Amino acid sequence: MIITGHGAEAVEKACADSGAMFVRQMPQLGTGHAVQMAVPALDDAQGVTLILNGDVPLIRTETAAALVRSCGGNKLALLTIELPDATGYGRIVREGAQVRAIVEHKDASEAQRQIQEIYTGIMAAPTALLKSWVMALKNDNAQREFYLTDVVAAAVADGVEVLAVAAASETEVLGVNSPVQLADLERRHQRAVAESLMEAGVRLADPARLDVRGSLHCGTDVDIDVNCVFEGTVHIGDGARIGANCIIRDTRIGAGAVVHPFTHMEEATVGEGALIGPFARLRPGAELGREVHIGNFVEVKNTTMAAGSKANHLAYLGDAIVGERVNYGAGSITANYDGAHKHRTVIGNDVHVGSNCVLVAPVTLGDGATIGGGSTISKDVPAGQLTVARARQTTLAGWQRPQKNKAKAPPHK
């Protein structure tokens, strides 16, 4: 269940695919009031309610599960942490070792503000008891709000044990209230991801310059240079090397492949030992076999290339099937779109396509065919033959280049 308030429509739209139930808090009269809005939807049966804050993005599943276990269905479990500067947070007030209350910063005395143990805003409570505690909250405080933290005093009054469960790290309980705090948490998160990768044997040129915006799965001896961005789900095989400034999304890269700097990949598959880039672009549906070479300023889309084929310079392959050991020349393209529909180009094994060729799909080049440079191919090409399709070179004697008219300058006055 998600309780929304300010910006409710935007939040609900963003979370529409989560399957969660939404409850709106209008107006916003405090954290206790927010939970009050959810009370009618809470099951009266025995169980545990876990309360999380939407502005605490890095809380770990393991931490939340441990809090629920500590609650056990008959205790109030609070997630706490000690901070050197606890300004703005509710303080954990104890009598000896026993938790007796949480005092919000604005309502705390000077002595209480010296307490460094703070409440993170995350708790687990027996559902039936939580409902009764929340509905009895009062707003007689400096904020004139209904504080959820007041349920601690209610639990103590009812003789329910209150447990303070320490969070593993400050990072997972920090909230976001500004762009500065959001950027800080993002860097903390990326550093944790980087350390996890390095502990698993990945070599990062600089862990501070890595962005994993999804899940990155690496084999052994993987080497990643600086400023790389990984989105969606990316798999990198053993011994692969990723150059600087690459953007890779939902892609699988085979063992021993080398991706040179400034390469973009999306929904692609790269075979073992392939060489990609620099400045290459693999679009969705690019499936490259073993030891395929894709060079600088080459774009591949919805195309399979079998083992050992090469497109090393300034080329485009779209909607094509390319066989083994093909050499695809600089400046050559597949003209796969007729203005309404996409068509496929089939290039057989051991084909050599010269520079600056246009293959007008649908067209098939037979095994071992050679296409002369500068040719525009619009018909199927037989296997093992040289095919040339270009106008005869002509020189016109005495021809002169047109000259611009030189306007006379106006007379000087």
Image: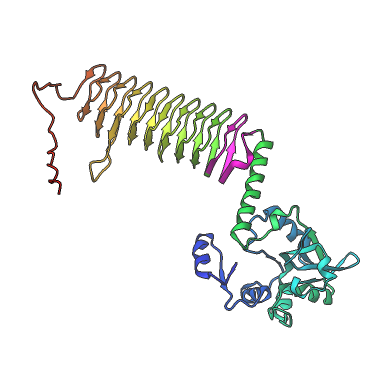
Whole-percent x, y for residue 300 in the image: 38, 35
Q: Is residue 91 magenta?
A: no
Residue at 73% x, 78% y: name it. 132
Res 30 seen here: yes
Residue at 28% x, 41% y: name it. 342
Work out which residue is located at the far left of the displayed protein and give it.
398
Q: Is residue 218 magenta?
A: yes
Could you tell whether 319 is left or right of 30 in the image?
left
Res 72 seen here: no
- Give the residues drawn in magenta, as a range: 202-230
Residue at 43% x, 26% y: name it. 292
**In this figure, which colouring scheme has been used for the structure?**
rainbow
Could you tell whether 270 is left or right of 33 in the image?
left
Q: Quadrant of the N terminus?
A: bottom right
For residue 57, above or below residue 204: below
Whole-percent x, y for residue 186 in the image: 61, 51
Whole-percent x, y for residue 64 in the image: 70, 58
Could you tell whether 140 is left or right of 332 in the image?
right
Tally of numbered tags: 0
